[in-house]
């Protein structure tokens, strides 16, 4: 019937989206599975939304800004990705531009203090780990927690939620086929949502790493 055909077309489209989402998740998991490289300084390339040139990280000095300038008038600032290669620390492994926010010195100092205290507690339980290893753990845990707190996924459960919309005059075979299609749609939606949430958490973790690195560079003379 027409309803079954439409459901099957929707299912095929959703299958394609689910496969793409899961391929992306697999790519990020493979990158995260590679151990951290030996610690070394890294340089971020930073660009503004209104320009096509790059600013060497650290060239921006907050003390040079005129007091009272409207923040809304400033162009957005982005860090270019360092990539997903094994030579990049895991907390900086990302392959998309990251928008950077302005972080005040006091906020940065509080964040650094929190990192050192939490790292000491972490090492007391799990043994020694390098700072870049702990930062990856910290940012991933924080992103995963935030993602679970804000996840409002409302995938319907089987055909029960749509029984009221089913045409009871349809043939039993048509109803069974339509129900199977709906159940497959629910499963695909759940898989796609899981993959999307994992990708979003990885992006949030990387964004936290880039943001910290950028803020440290901007305030390194303080």
Image (cartoon, grey):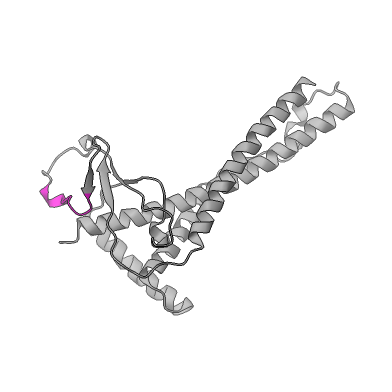
**Which image quadrant: the N terminus?**
top right
Residue 58 magenta: yes
**Which image quadrant: the C terminus?**
bottom left
Which of these two is toward me, 20 or 156? 20
Q: Is residue 179 left or right of residue 215?
A: right
In percent of the image, x 59 and y 47: which residue is there? 22
Q: Is residue 106 left or right of residue 93?
A: left
Above or below — where is 105 with respect to 16? below
Which of these two is toward me, 216 or 153? 216
- Can you give x and y, in whole percent of width and height, for residue 7 in the image? 72, 28
- In the rendered image, the residue lying farthest to the right is 172
Above or below — where is 74 with respect to 208? above
- Can you give x and y, in whole percent of width and height, for residue 9 in the image? 69, 28
Count numbered badges in the picture.
0
Tell me if residue 113 can be seen. yes
In percent of the image, x 61 and y 42: which residue is there? 19
Quarter-wise, where is residue 124 in the image? bottom left
Report the span colored magenta: 56-64
- Can you give x and y, in whole percent of width and height, for residue 176 in the image? 84, 33
Q: Is residue 196 left or right of residue 173?
A: left
- Can you give x and y, in whole percent of width and height, for residue 143 in the image? 46, 54
Residue 179 magenta: no
In percent of the image, x 43 and y 73: which residue is there? 122
In percent of the image, x 27 and y 39: which residue is there? 76
Tell me if residue 153 can be seen. no
């Amino acid at each position: 019937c027409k309803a079954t055909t439409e459901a099957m077309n929707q299912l095929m489209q959703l299958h394609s989206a689910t496969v793409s989402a899961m391929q992306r998740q697999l790519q990020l998991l493979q990158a995260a599975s590679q151990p951290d490289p030996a610690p070394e300084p890294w340089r971020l390339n930073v660009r503004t939304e209104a320009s096509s040139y790059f600013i060497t990280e650290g060239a921006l000095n907050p003390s040079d800004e005129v007091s009272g300038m409207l923040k809304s008038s400033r162009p957005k600032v982005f860090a270019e990705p360092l990539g997903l290669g094994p030579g990049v620390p895991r907390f900086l492994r990302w392959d998309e531009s990251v928008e950077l926010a302005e972080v005040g010195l006091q906020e940065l100092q509080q964040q650094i203090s929190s990192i050192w205290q939490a790292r000491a507690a972490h090492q007391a339980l799990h043994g020694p780990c390098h700072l870049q290893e702990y930062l990856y753990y910290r940012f991933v845990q924080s992103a995963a927690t935030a993602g679970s707190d804000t996840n409002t996924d409302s995938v319907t459960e089987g055909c029960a939620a749509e029984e009221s919309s089913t045409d009871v005059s349809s043939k039993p075979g048509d109803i069974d086929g339509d129900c199977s299609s709906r159940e497959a749609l629910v499963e695909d939606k759940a898989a796609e949502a899981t993959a999307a949430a994992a990708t979003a958490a990885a992006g949030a973790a990387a964004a936290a790493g880039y943001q910290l690195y950028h803020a440290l560079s901007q305030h390194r003379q303080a």
